[in-house]
């Protein structure tokens, strides 16, 4: 599916559209007009004089920093053993090849020779191992994804990683920047090097092992202190490119004419169920509800096309996404009705579903911190109500939402989580899983999940299919969509972008600057 979206919308317009659709509870066909892009600037419009990027005053360290503005620059300076493409498939970068022990616990990554850091010193296994160990430490933003690693050690021209449990998708977790040195801006092996001073910039470096032609030799860095500074710098053309989550909780209000280049992410919106008490403890009811959620309207209309509808816990771009299985779980009011009947429910004279004299009534939680997700929840609740299910939509602050989930005071809730690139749904299905608020338990799903985690290559696709089929039967949660994020560029400033989740500059050698 094509991921370049040359839309020219202000965030205010997007918010208004999402709210109107969410409150009206209308379908895509009824409400979604053809997009009307803002006209391109005339030839008389003054274009930016040079391609420039923002940089904040925070740390640039790619393993320790949490500064989103500075982390955006990472793909220009540092490289990892692997890089994820737009299908979330790991592609080797600083890793030449790898082997795995028979028990799946010990991985040996042979490193690429002839690679140097920006100061000309050779890239060695010691730097790779040191970086990975720093990345799995408590102070690193990568600590969570690497929690399954028991040890990392340098060998002759290789790095050995020992796991506590098999993970056939380990390379997908190793798109982690390899650095040399201390401080807020350690050295990297990438195409650019940071030059400080009163006018900081990124400059092309000599000796880059990939030796690809780059579209610009020097990129000025504009100082950004606050969010308002970033908005102003972009709106005035002082910076040429920014990244944004246009449906995020703290989405920034960029205005004017710009191009939007969406890219897929591993952030999943889903419906979680209380599988331990209440009506949703019945898997038959969960299977019925699974067919009652209109994923397409949620992704296209309510999230303003900044999402991809999905029925499986992997993005549609992933090779693990099975379209045949996804279609079996597609939105169908008729299937919802049939499955409710099979589950023992029937409609009363008022058109409400129930068993005996007890009406089917569900408590649905959503937090109010994100306007877009609130609109999605309102729409889905209204659709269930139209089908004859009584829904109490509770709109809670983040703190109250967390308390209600932890106490099990819900039947279903709207949630979101950024999955790691091995797409392990265990956090939703395992006992003690961080998102298993409904206390779902299943020995069958546990066995299927373990087989999926062990598998690699073609075997992983087969194991994934078996797991997806098991999740279809048990329906411990319902996937709605995977969010996109966006690269915004000044109109006509650059073309040929192919951003990925962790590197908006992926494929920069194919960019063309200017009209």
Image (cartoon, rainbow, N blue to C red):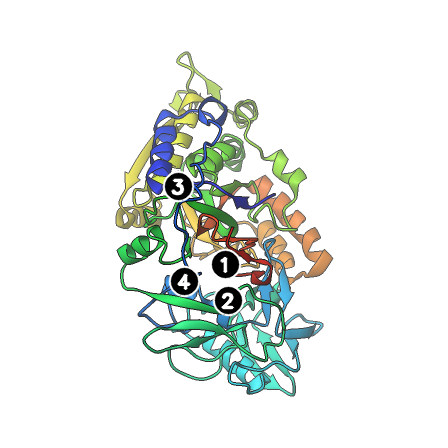
Q: Please state the horizontal and vertical placement of residue 334, each as a whole percent of the image.
A: 55, 22
Which comes sooner in the sequence, label 2 or label 4?
4
Which comes sooner in the sequence, label 4 or label 3?
4
Q: Please state the horizontal and vertical placement of residue 499, each as a whole percent of the image.
A: 53, 55
Which comes sooner in the sequence, label 4 or label 1?
4
Rate crowding at label 1 as few (under 14), some (14 to 19) or many (20 or more) other CA atoms within 10 Å.
many
Badge 2 vs badge 1, beta-carbon distance below 8 Å: yes
Describe residue 408's horizontal placement relative to residue 341 as left or right: left
Q: Mark 3 points at which residue?
A: 413
**Residue 466 higher or lower than 116, as above or below:** above
Q: Which of 69 and 148 is in front in this view?
A: 69
Secondary element at tag 4: strand
Q: Name the residue under label 2.
A: 75
Foreground mark, 1 or 3? 1
Rate crowding at label 4 as few (under 14), some (14 to 19) or many (20 or more) other CA atoms within 10 Å.
many
Badge 4 vs badge 1, beta-carbon distance below 8 Å: no
Question: Residue at 42% of width from left, 21% of height from top?
Answer: 386
Report the Cα–Cα distance between label 2 and label 4. Answer: 13 Å
Secondary element at tag 2: helix
Q: Mark 4 points at which residue?
A: 53
Secondary element at tag 1: loop
Q: Please state the horizontal and vertical placement of residue 53, each as a whole percent of the image.
A: 41, 62
Q: Please state the horizontal and vertical placement of residue 140, each as a whole percent of the image.
A: 41, 72
Report the Cα–Cα distance between label 1 and label 3. Answer: 32 Å
Question: Residue at 50% of width from left, 77% of height from top?
Answer: 188
* Placement of the N terminus among the 4 image quadrants: top right
């Amino acid at each position: 599916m094509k991921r370049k979206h040359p839309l020219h919308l202000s965030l205010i317009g997007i918010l208004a559209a999402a709210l109107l659709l969410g409150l009206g509870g209308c379908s895509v066909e009824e409400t979604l007009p053809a997009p009307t892009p803002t006209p391109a600037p005339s030839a008389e419009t003054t274009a930016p004089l040079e391609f420039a990027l923002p940089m904040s005053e925070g740390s640039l360290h790619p393993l320790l920093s949490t500064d989103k503005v500075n982390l955006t620059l990472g793909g220009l300076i540092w490289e990892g053993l692997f890089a994820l493409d737009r299908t979330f498939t790991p592609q080797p970068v600083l890793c030449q090849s790898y082997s795995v022990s028979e028990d799946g616990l010990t991985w040996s990554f042979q490193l690429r020779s002839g690679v140097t850091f920006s100061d000309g010193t050779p890239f060695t296994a010691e730097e790779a191992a040191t970086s990975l160990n720093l990345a799995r430490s408590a102070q690193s933003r990568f600590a969570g994804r690497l929690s399954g690693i028991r040890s990392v050690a340098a060998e002759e021209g290789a790095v050995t990683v020992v796991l506590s449990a098999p993970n056939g998708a380990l390379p997908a977790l190793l798109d982690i920047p390899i650095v040399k040195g201390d401080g807020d801006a350690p050295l990297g092996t990438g195409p650019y090097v940071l030059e400080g001073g009163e006018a900081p910039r990124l400059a092309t470096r000599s000796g880059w092992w990939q030796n690809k032609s780059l579209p610009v030799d020097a990129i000025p860095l504009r100082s950004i202190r606050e969010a308002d500074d970033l908005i102003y710098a972009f709106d005035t053309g002082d910076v040429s490119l920014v990244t944004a989550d246009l449906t995020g909780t703290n989405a920034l209000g960029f205005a004017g004419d710009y191009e939007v280049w969406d890219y897929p992410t591993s952030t999943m919106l889903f419906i979680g169920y209380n599988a331990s008490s209440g009506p949703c403890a019945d898997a038959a009811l969960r299977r019925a509800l699974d067919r009652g959620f209109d994923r397409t309207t949620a992704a296209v209309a309510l999230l303003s096309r900044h999402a991809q509808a999905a029925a499986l816990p992997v993005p549609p771009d992933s090779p693990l996404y099975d379209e045949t299985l996804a279609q079996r779980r597609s939105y169908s009011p008729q299937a919802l009705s049939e499955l409710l009947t099979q589950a023992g429910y029937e409609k009363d004279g008022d058109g409400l579903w129930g068993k005996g004299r007890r009406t089917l009534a569900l408590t649905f939680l959503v937090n109010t911190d994100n306007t877009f997700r609130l609109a999605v929840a309102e729409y889905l609740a209204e659709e269930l109500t139209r089908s004859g299910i009584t829904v109490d939509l509770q709109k809670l602050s983040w703190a109250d939402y967390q308390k209600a989930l932890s106490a099990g005071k819900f039947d279903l809730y709207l949630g979101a989580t950024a999955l790691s690139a091995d797409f392990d749904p265990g956090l939703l299905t395992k006992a003690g899983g961080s998102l298993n608020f409904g206390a779902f338990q299943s020995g069958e799903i546990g066995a299927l999940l373990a087989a999926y985690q062990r598998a690699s290559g073609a075997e992983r696709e087969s194991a994934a299919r078996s797991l997806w089929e098991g999740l279809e039967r048990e329906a411990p949660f319902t996937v709605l969509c995977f969010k996109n994020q966006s690269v915004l560029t000044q109109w006509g400033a650059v073309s040929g972008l192919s951003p990925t989740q962790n590197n908006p500059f992926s494929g920069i050698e194919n960019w063309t600057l200017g009209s």
